[in-house]
Amino acid sequence: MKYLKYYLYALIVFLLDQAAKWVIVKRIPIGEERPVLGDFLVITSHRNRGAAFGILQNQRWFFIIITIIVVIGILWYLRKTIREGKVLLSFALSLLLGGALGNFLDRALFGEVVDFIQVTFDFDIFGKSIYYIYPIFNVADSAIVIGVILIFLESLLVWRREKKGATHEHKPDLS
């Protein structure tokens, strides 16, 4: 039963991703933009035949094979982390799993991924104008990024605990 909740988290990410993509495909023509928070956050309709930031365009089978391998690895590691009681790491892997499966389904069925969230940074800092449009992404991409950040955070926490433990072990006995 303790395994089930992590697979449920992955399923929720997958379903949210697919529902959002379905709405975008059905309601917003490719290239159309709908402001949410001015120019900062815009919902648009875009298709990506590559990976993050548009790299490796038209490598569908490569991504399908790599994703199958990655998903098998995530499933194996997820079972291991759940058995070991690593809650944060298990949750992070659930996010990775749901996101990977969401983009995998798009690639497998359509040969491209539906992206729709666009963020634009446009501000002045220290008299310098900054204008940057972040590559368009989707819910699956967001889950993957959050999962990776949580894995990094978990690694830092483990490192800190190990360092703290090592410090206590090497303190001289002054009694």
Image (cartoon, grey):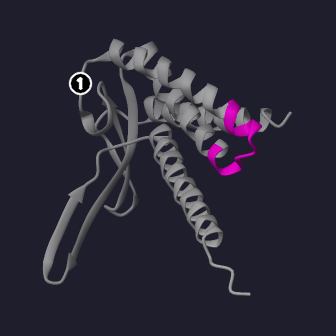
**Residue 95 appears at what percent x and percent y?**
58, 40
Q: How many marks?
A: 1
**Residue 45 appears at what percent x and percent y?**
36, 37
Whether 147 is drawn above or below 41: the answer is above
Q: Quadrant of the C terminus?
A: bottom right
**Residue 6 appears at what percent x and percent y?**
72, 37
- The amino acid type, in three-letter code, at marker 1 is Gln
Q: Tell me the residue at 62%/63% (across/down).
A: 161
Residue that sits furthest to the front in the current view:
175
Q: In which quarter of the image is the N terminus?
A: top right
Residue that sits furthest to the bottom in the current view:
175
Query: Front-most of 163 and 22?
Result: 163
Query: Front-most of 18 and 8?
Result: 8
Residue that sits furthest to the right in the current view:
1
Q: Tell me the residue at 38%/42% (across/down).
A: 137
Q: Tell me the residue at 62%/46% (across/down).
A: 89
At label 1, counting other C-alpha atoms closer than 10 Å, the crowd grade (few under 14, some 14-19, many 20 or more) is: few
Q: Tell me the residue at 45%/22% (across/down).
A: 67
Query: Front-most of 120 and 24?
Result: 120
Whether 55 is drawn above or below 108: the answer is below
SS at badge 1: loop
Quadrant for residue 116, please give it. Answer: top left
> Overall secondary structure of the magenta stretch?
helix
**Residue 78 appears at what percent x and percent y?**
65, 33
**In screen coordinates, is 63 left or right of 88?**
left
In this picture, which residue range is highlighted in magenta?
79-89
Whether 5 is drawn above or below 173: the answer is above
User: Which residue lies under the disc numbered 1?
Assistant: 57
